[in-house]
């Protein structure tokens, strides 16, 4: 077999439509977002407006009800009395961190202190409902 034949076969594959190039042994992945719950949007315990995107909501510390992520960040920023050279970042899992204000994404993260905001022992019912809907797709 010479190199010319191999190149012509490769070119032939590249000119095929995308569907013809797909590996038919792999399962189809449907990238549609998970459906939102059918219950009415709860009101944010901080600002009082409806929390329509429960996927980005944080469980409010007082009653575990969904609150806007932005409302929690503002509340925590005020409550923590951050210095001018500090800023608040979300670390995941209901944990926020105080980092230097000059932190640039991609640098090693130097967390000055961590704030466990959500109760990690008990998952709120509204989040369980979201998890079950997403997992059952």
Image (cartoon, rainbow, N blue to C red):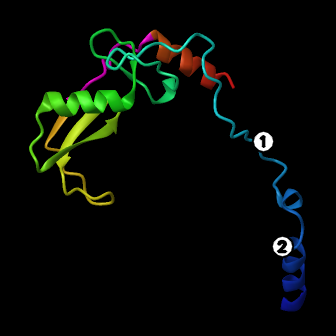
In the rendered image, residue 114 lying in the magenta stretch gets the answer no
Identify the residue at horizontal 13%, vertical 31% (top origin): 80
Residue at numbered disc 2: 14
Helix, strand, or loop for circle 1?
loop
The image shows residue 90 at horizontal and vertical percentages of 31, 38
Compared to residue 98, the image places residue 63 above or below, namely: above
Q: Crowding at label 1, few (<14), some or many (≥20) Cα neighbours within 10 Å?
A: few
Could you say which quadrant of the image residue 16 lies in? bottom right
Compared to residue 15, the image places residue 93 above or below, namely: above
Residue at numbered disc 1: 28
- Which badge, 2 or 1, is on the more N-terminal residue? 2
Compared to residue 25, the image places residue 107 above or below, namely: below
Q: How many marks?
A: 2
Residue 2 can be seen in this image: no
In the rendered image, residue 117 lying in the magenta stretch gets the answer yes
Identify the residue at horizontal 68%, vertical 40% (top origin): 31
Residue 84 horizontal side relative to residue 94, left or right: left
The residue lying toward the viewer, choosing from 94 and 3, is 94
Please give the range of residues in magenta.
115-124
Q: Quadrant of the C terminus?
A: top right
Q: Quadrant of the N terminus?
A: bottom right
The image shows residue 25 at horizontal and vertical percentages of 82, 47
Predominant SS along the magenta part: loop
Helix, strand, or loop for circle 2?
helix
Residue 107 horizontal side relative to residue 125, left or right: left
Residue 125 numbered tag: none
The residue lying toward the viewer, choosing from 43 and 3, is 43
């Amino acid at each position: 077999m010479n190199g010319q034949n191999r190149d012509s076969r490769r070119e032939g594959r590249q000119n095929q439509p995308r569907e013809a190039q797909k590996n038919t042994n792999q399962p189809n992945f449907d990238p549609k977002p998970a459906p939102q719950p059918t219950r009415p949007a709860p009101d944010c315990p901080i600002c009082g407006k409806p929390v329509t995107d429960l996927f980005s909501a944080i469980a409010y510390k007082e009653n575990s009800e969904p609150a806007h992520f932005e409302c929690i960040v503002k509340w925590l920023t005020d409550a923590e009395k951050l210095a001018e050279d500090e800023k608040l970042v979300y670390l995941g899992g209901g944990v926020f961190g105080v980092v230097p204000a000059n932190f640039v994404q991609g640098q090693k993260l130097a967390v000055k202190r961590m704030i466990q905001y959500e109760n990690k022992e008990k998952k709120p019912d509204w989040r369980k409902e979201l998890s079950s809907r997403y997992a059952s797709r």
